[in-house]
């Protein structure tokens, strides 16, 4: 769906937006789910100055809760959802983000992260 008129522009155009779920299931170690390393992620965003390249949001619930530790990555032409992330997957995510920042462009997502991708929405076909 395209806008009928001119689109608003922001001076803060990033390569992408990363949304980390930290809701009723994600990161709830007491319920047997893996940790979501929010402190690590925030520190890495600052350390590598990723905020100008990738916006970071922490969400209350992204769903689906049957695949806890969900993240979403949105770019200009793609939207991915991943589930069942372990702590090492968040480290891999940060490495990918830093690599993209260094080149100033999106690189292919690591295959081990892509193995955690999911079909989030049903098709209207």
Image (cartoon, rainbow, N blue to C red):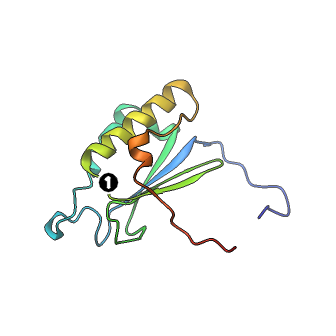
For disc 1, the marked residue is 85
Q: In the rendered view of the protein, which quadrant contains the N terminus?
A: bottom right
Q: Nearer the viewer, residue 120 or 24?
A: 120
Q: Nearer the viewer, residue 18 or 90?
A: 90
Q: Could you tell whether 86 is left or right of 109 in the image?
A: left
- Report if residue 43 is visible in the image: yes
Residue at x-position 65% and y-position 49%: 77
Left or right of residue 79, residue 36 in this image: left
Residue located at (50% from left, 30% from top): 101
Residue 99 in the image: state x and y as whole percent.
46, 29
- Residue beneath the point at 32% across and 58% down: 84
Q: Toward which corner of the image does residue 22 lie, by quadrant?
A: bottom left
Secondary structure beneath dot 1 equals loop
Q: Which residue in the rendered view is the most extreme toward the right?
A: 5
The percent position of residue 111, horizontal first and vertical second, equals 43, 40
Q: Residues within 10 Å of mark 1 (few under 14, many from 20)?
A: many
The answer to whether 30 is drawn above or below residue 96 in the figure is below
| Residue at the limit of the structure toward the top, as seen here | 103
Relative image position of residue 89 (x, y in whole percent):
32, 45
State the residue at coordinates (64%, 47%): 76
Quarter of the C terminus within the rendering: bottom right
| Tag count | 1
Task: Tell me the quarter of the picture where residue 35 sits.
Answer: bottom left
Q: Is residue 45 visible?
A: no
* x and y, in percent, of residue 30 in the image: 14, 68
- Quadrant of the image occupied by residue 90: top left
């Amino acid at each position: 769906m395209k806008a009928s008129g001119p689109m608003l522009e922001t001076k803060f155009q990033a390569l992408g937006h990363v949304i980390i779920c930290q809701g009723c299931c994600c990161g709830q170690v007491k319920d047997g789910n893996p940790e979501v390393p929010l402190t690590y992620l925030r520190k890495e965003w600052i350390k590598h100055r990723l905020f100008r390249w990738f916006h970071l949001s922490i969400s209350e619930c992204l769903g689906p809760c049957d695949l806890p530790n969900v993240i979403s990555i949105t770019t200009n032409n793609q939207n991915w959802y991943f589930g069942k992330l372990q702590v090492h997957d968040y480290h891999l995510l940060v490495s990918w983000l830093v690599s993209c920042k260094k080149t100033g462009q999106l690189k292919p997502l690591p295959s081990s992260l892509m193995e955690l991708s999911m079909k989030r929405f049903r098709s209207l076909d």
